[in-house]
Every structure is written in structure tokens, then in C-alpha cells.
Image (cartoon, helix red, strand yellow):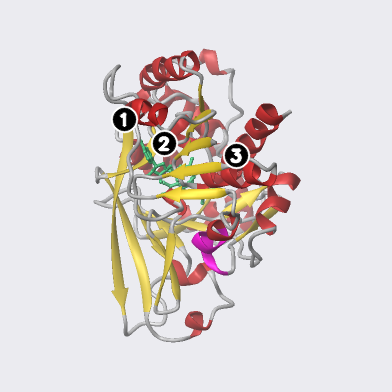
Amino acid sequence: MILIIGAGIAGITLARLFADKGKEVMLVDRRDFIGGLCYDYLDKGIFVQQYGPHIFHTNNDRVWKFVNNYAAFNDYTHTVIAMVNGREVNLPMCIKSIYDFYGLDNYEEATVRFNQSFIKPKKDSQYKSTYSFLIDRYGKDYTDSILKPYSEKVWDCVIDDLPTNIFERIPIRNNFDTRYFVDGFQGMPRNGFTDMMRDMLDSTKISILLGTSMDYQHALDMKPDLIINTGYLDSFFNYCYGKLKYIKLDFEVVDVPDLKFYQRSSVFNYPKGTFFRRTEFKHFYPERKAYNTHGTIYMKEFVGGKEICYPSPRLQDREDAQKYLDLAAEKKVYCCGRFGSYQYLNMDSVILKAMELVDTLTS
Ligand SMILES: Cc1cc2nc3c(=O)[nH]c(=O)nc-3n(C[C@H](O)[C@H](O)[C@H](O)COP(=O)(O)OP(=O)(O)OC[C@H]3O[C@@H](n4cnc5c(N)ncnc54)[C@H](O)[C@@H]3O)c2cc1C
């Protein structure tokens, strides 16, 4: 039997792929429901995502084919708007954002501003600090009003504690493309993420044990042939090297019965103020009946809650996690997923890494 700890998208993908290869799987989660951070549920015909907005996007054909075996996807295209000094600015930065950011109304002025703000980056090692990297790469206005305050809020630290590599993937577009993701495939599973994951688990080879927190000793007691941990590394090993740093969030869901829409787009980011993001879920599913009727639901996200949502990107915290990863390797526990590997991974990367692990272990 293969024992998999954690029934998020990582554990569920692993379970499905092993089951397809004829292996018996036991999937365990400390929560009473499957899905981990991707868990969603229906409320008044609206899919509410319990742990914040999740949009599926990938460039990987294999991953896209895999998820399409278990769900049909709509063609939702994600956009994000930041609220800056009362102005709505599309992210990532493009020429349209420059218009809105500076309150401009002509293309010439916007392109001049764009060229003034976005200077060609130097090599990473030449920067004295993350802040100076951002200023050089994105300009002072964008850095001071969006990047710095938003990142400090979300990552719960000062900007210079963050490595520059987490910013390198933020694009700057010399055009009017306001899509947040430009991957070849993106969309939302038409019946929600939980339904998709439930379908993945539809196999007689998979047993599921919910409401059970499992540590290493408990896992050994089950006498499995193989242990794969996709859960939190520190609690699995009984905090033997201390607690790891996680970014924890709190989610406030607000029901607005008398409005058709609360905001004009699914996601608004707030660099200033108590919460960092507001999501109105209806926008993800324009094809659903609830989209056109009155009543809407939005969510505000706050840093500092109780739900473990991100591994920390700080170097020191990654080094602390490495001790647990080394211990896992020594004990022949395979690690996968966002928390099992202590990496900032999106769903598609989690699925791909799960596929690669199954390929390796069954070849
Ligand atoms: C706010 C937010 C927005 C996001 N938006 C996107 C997005 O738009 N697109 C995208 O692709 N990705 C997004 N992500 C990332 C996505 O959530 C993750 O890539 C994915 O959910 C990780 O899956 P996982 O199975 O590795 O981890 P999880 O979903 O966290 O699953 C791990 C499971 O392990 C369980 N567990 C932990 N320890 C134990 C234990 N000792 N015993 C038993 N069970 C245990 C937990 O209860 C949990 O259910 C977002 C993440 C967050 C937080």
C-alpha cells in the first residue's frame, strides 16, 4: 500500500496516478474534506473558494490533458486590478496601467512615462538591495505605491528580506494586454475544483481517511510500502527542528444579497489598508445562472490568520525547511506538493511534480 499524507491537489494527483498503475493507495488528511487549499463549495449557485481565489493556468500539455480528464473548463481569462490612490490600475503593468496610474489620456504621454519608469535591469548581483532592484526594474512610482507595500503586507516582512527572484517573473508589458496570466491554457473547472478532485479519486484502489493528522511514527505504524508526504514538513516530523515559517491568512466571506455585482472584476488588490485582496467569485463563472441574478459573495483576505497558505520565500526559512527535507530523504519519505517540498508552487506545477514522482517511482 502507498500511504499519501495530504489530500490536496498534490496528494489527489498522486493517488489517481498510482491507482491507474494498479497500486493500492491510502490517502490521509487532517481536515474533514478533500481538496486542501483548492477546496470550494456552492453557496446560492456561486462557487466560493474557501482559501482564496484559484484560477487554473498552465503551459504544460500533459497537465492540461490530465485535468481535462476530470473536469470541463470554461474559458475564463483572469485580470487583476490594484487600487492605488483611488485609481484602478491593471496588473501586471502595461500601457493601459500607465494611463490609469497617472491619470493620462493620450498614448504619447503614456509611452514616454512607460519608458521613463521601466529601465533595463542590471545583473542581480549588482543590486545592493531588493528595494534597489525593484526601483531599477519597475521605477520608483510603481515600486513605492504597489510592489513594496503589497509584498511587505503579503509576505509579512520588510522588502529587503525578500529574494529578488520572486519578483523576476513579474512582467512589464509594452502593450495593452491586461491578462494576468498568458499561459496557453487557462480557465475554471465548470463544476468547481472540489468536484474535479472528487472525480480524480473515483477508483476502487483509493481509500481515504479524513480528520486524521499523521506524523512519521503513525505513518510507519500503518506498514506502508511507500510514504509520500504532501503535508507540512515540521508537524509530520513532530517539530524536531522547530516550527517552520508559513504565511498564514484569514478569510472573511461577505454575502451581499441586494447587489448583482460588488466590483467590476474578480480580483482587486489593495497595497494599503487592512486586507490585501478582495475577490468576487461570480466573475469566474459567467456561464452560470447565478452570474446574472441578484446576490453576490465576496471575500477579503488578511495576512496573519490561522490558515497555512504559503511557504516563506526568505532564504533563512528555506534553509530551515531543508533540514526537514534532508531528514525525509534519510527516512525514505518522499516529499511533494507546496508544503511537502516547501516551495511556492501553483497547481499546475504541483500536478507536474506529482506526475514526475510517479514516473520515477514506477519506472
Ligand atoms: C490564496 C491562494 C491563491 C492561490 N491561487 C492560485 C491560482 O490562482 N492558481 C494556481 O495554480 N495556484 C494557486 N494557489 C496555489 C495552490 O493553492 C497550490 O498550488 C495547491 O493548492 C497546493 O496543493 P498541495 O496539495 O500541495 O497543498 P494543500 O492544498 O495545502 O494540501 C495539503 C494537505 O495536507 C494536509 N496535511 C498537512 N499536514 C498533514 C498531516 N500531518 N496529516 C494529515 N494531513 C496533513 C492539509 O490539511 C492539506 O489538505 C493559490 C494559493 C493560495 C493560498
Location of residue 261 with respect to 161 vertically, above or below: below
Location of residue 27 with respect to 138 vertically, above or below: below
Q: Tag 1, which secondary structure?
A: helix
Q: Earlier in the sequence, mark 3 or mark 1?
A: 1
Is label 1's Cβ within 8 Å of ligand 1?
A: yes
Kind of residue indicated by mark 1: Ser
Residue at image coords 54%, 28% = 225
Q: Tag 2, which secondary structure?
A: loop
Query: Is residue 193 one of those drawn in magenta?
Result: yes
Q: Using the image as rendered, state which of residue 28 and residue 82 is in the foreground.
A: 28
Is label 2's Cβ within 8 Å of ligand 1?
A: yes
Is label 3's Cβ within 8 Å of ligand 1?
A: yes
Task: Identify the residue position indicated by label 3 in the image.
Answer: 349
Q: Which mark is residue 231?
A: 2
Q: Is residue 233 left or right of residue 127?
A: left
Q: Tag 3, which secondary structure?
A: helix
Kind of residue indicated by mark 3: Ser
Q: Which mark is residue 156?
A: none
